[in-house]
Image: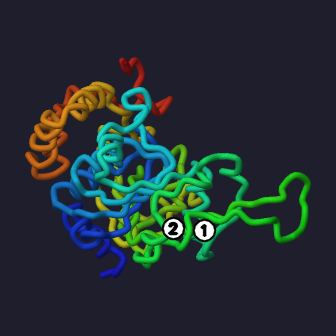
Amino acid sequence: MDMRTEKVMTLEAAIGKFVCDGAHLSIGGFTVNRNPMAAVYEIIRQGIKHLHLYAHSNGQGVDELIGGGCVANLEIAYGGSGRFAPTCIRFRKAVEHGRIRIEDYSNYQMTLRFLAGAMGVPFLPTRSGLGSSIVHRWGFSGPEREADDRLPDRKLCVIDNPFGDWGEAHKVVLVPAINPDVTIIHVQKADPAGTARIDGLTFADVEQAKAAQHVIVTCEELVPTDALRKNPDLNRIPFFCVDAVVHVPFGAYPTACYRYYDYDPAYLNDYREMALDDDRHKDYLSRFVHGVADHQSFLELQGKERLDKIRADERTGYAVGLDRR
């Protein structure tokens, strides 16, 4: 047997093997696009706690992990689900009540932090953040950083350009690398060895995957390796970066997966209303997360008619005629 095929496993097994209490976890996707939601729900079901979570500009995945009581610390550029929640609801409540610690960066800074981790360098320079409060407001204090050897000593450093003046660029910002224990991304296609193909925008998923010690890929289609050898320039993640491959159709639902299905506005509207009220949110978790055995059961609870409404049009890659209000 090809040892690489042993990467194919159930979602329950993948999460149980690679994600543990206190892990430094990164999830891919962007706002309401390609969040690894099946994995998020499985993490909540398994009762994993005290995660140190990293995300670029995530929405539903971040909010549900926080709402599920899984997150202690968060480093992020933006947490929101578009018009459904310009600021994620359970995320905001957790910050306001001091239930999580958060440190914020610009979008570009977070991308560079993942890129530095992928490159194996301790930091990368940028001008992003200069003139903003991002430079001065730290989510983790000096003593907290000293007590946690997984945190960099400083949020960032502003230094003089070491190569002399370069026009107006006298100062640069150094942002520290991120190297998560685990990154989870959802993709359109993967093979049993772990080679992954992402259609459309990749966001920071590639950098997040390459920066991590372990990578879990969930996919819409599990395809033979030969299928990905056609047009190999479209493959985004090489097999040697990936530790687990999980076939989960609709694995990003209720967020979108380009060319397969759109986000579900009805679900996201309902979620917003339930997330705003603590008691209704507990009922939500009880019914839609803890009350189902797996993601397939969760999808069955939504019903075929609902899923058919968001299926992507072959030409555009999005659902045509979808009421997005």
Q: Identity of the amino acid at label 1?
A: Ala
Comparing 207 with 99, the one in front is 99
Q: Residues within 10 Å of mark 1 (few under 14, many from 20)?
A: many
**Horizontal and vertical percent position of residue 106:** 58, 49
Q: Residue at x 44, y 48 (%)?
A: 29
- Nearer to me, 141 or 315: 141
Mark identifier at residue 178: 2
Which is nearer the eye, 197 or 225?
197
Q: Position of residue 302 (x, y in %)?
A: 17, 33
How many numbered marks are there? 2
Query: SS for tag 2?
Result: loop
- As shown in the figure, which amino acid type bears the numbered disc 2? Ile
**Could you tell whether 152 is left or right of 295 in the image?**
right
Q: Position of residue 39 (x, y in %)?
A: 28, 55
Labels 2 and 1 touching (C-beta < 8 A) = yes
Q: Decide: few, some or many residues near mark 2? Use Cα within 10 Å; few <14, some 14-19, many ≥20.
A: many
Q: Residue at x 35, y 41 (%)?
A: 92
Residue behind mark 1: 116
Q: In terms of sequence position, does the residue under pointer 2 or pointer 1 come before the other?
A: 1
